[in-house]
Image (tube, rainbow, N blue to C red):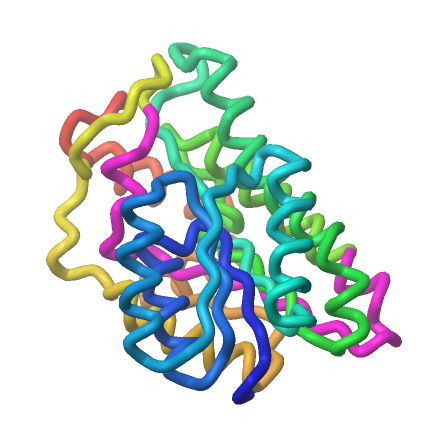
Amino acid sequence: MKGKTVVITGGSSGIGKALAVKFAQMGFNVVITGRDPSRLNNTSDQIQQTGAGCLSLVSDVSKWTDCEAVVAETLRRFGSIDVLINNAGISMRGILEETDISVIEQLMAINFWGTVYMTKLSLPHLLKSKGSVVGISSIAGKVGLPGRCAYSASKYAMEGFLSSVRTENIRKGLHVLVACPGFTASSIRKSSLGPNGKPQGESPRDESGMMTAEAVADHIYQAVVNRKRDLVLTANGKLTVFLNKWFPSLTDKLVFNHMSKEPGSPF
């Protein structure tokens, strides 16, 4: 893997940051994107301490022109794209009845359209390198979560899109991985949007017992190396996917009961 190039959207915090450091430690050139310059600089400093090549770009994946610039700058600096990790994403909490439509549009723009834009623009170069496309999805992309309708919709859409891309290129050597980390200790719940579009500020869940972003990054790196198709992490995540496949009505009730116990739950 040494000398290859990975592009990680949303690479300045949480799972994205952990992935950036992991791939750098393994010898990759690392390109990270994000909307917060200070966080990008902090992550870039950590990457450079490993001796890896690094390029950090302020970019909004919901904008086609920003994504064009990321791909162009990556090729200018490193000459290839070997792995694309579509990690940039935001979450939300609120029932559909109370959620402003702009919140749903914003989640689809970042979580879904950001994946489409970056994959579309990177595809010719990934086909050339017979590289990997990774989508950081969620258990919410396997099971519709109450109070997270826009988040679930965006992750279902991401998974359907990447599944089609995988099948379209089945004879061209492209690797497509959909990774579902399960509940992870990260900043995504703090920046999660409420029904009015404002960040909720604090996580509604106890994150002390959750899988760390670094552990998730280790699993995803190995899945890329081994060119796995799907990755579902945590025992609860695997159990939820299994139950939803064979006992969907029961799963609906279990998921509702679980989510309704969150502090400040809309239920």
In the depicted structure, whether residue 103 falls above or below residue 9 = above
Across the whole image, how many numbered discs are drawn on residues?
0
Q: Quadrant of the N terminus?
A: bottom right
**Magenta stretch, residue numbers:** 165-193
Q: Could you tell whether 14 is left or right of 226 in the image? A: left
Q: Is 204 in front, or is 5?
A: 5
Q: Position of residue 18 (x, y in %)?
A: 33, 66
Q: Quadrant of the C terminus?
A: top left
Residue at (63, 44) in percent of width and height? 67
In the depicted structure, whether residue 38 falls above or below residue 107 = below
Q: Position of residue 42 (x, y in %)?
A: 26, 56
In the depicted structure, whether residue 163 falls above or below residue 69 = below
Residue at (52, 47) in percent of width and height? 141
Q: Position of residue 115 (x, y in %)?
A: 62, 47
Residue at (83, 72) in percent of width and height? 170
Residue at (73, 68) in percent of width and height? 126
Q: Is residue 239 magenta?
A: no
Q: Position of residue 243 (x, y in %)?
A: 45, 57
Q: In the orientation shown, which residue stands out farthest toward the front?
A: 76
Q: Could you tell whether 39 is left or right of 152 in the image? A: left
Q: Is residue 182 magenta?
A: yes
In the depicted structure, whether residue 113 falls above or below residue 228 = above
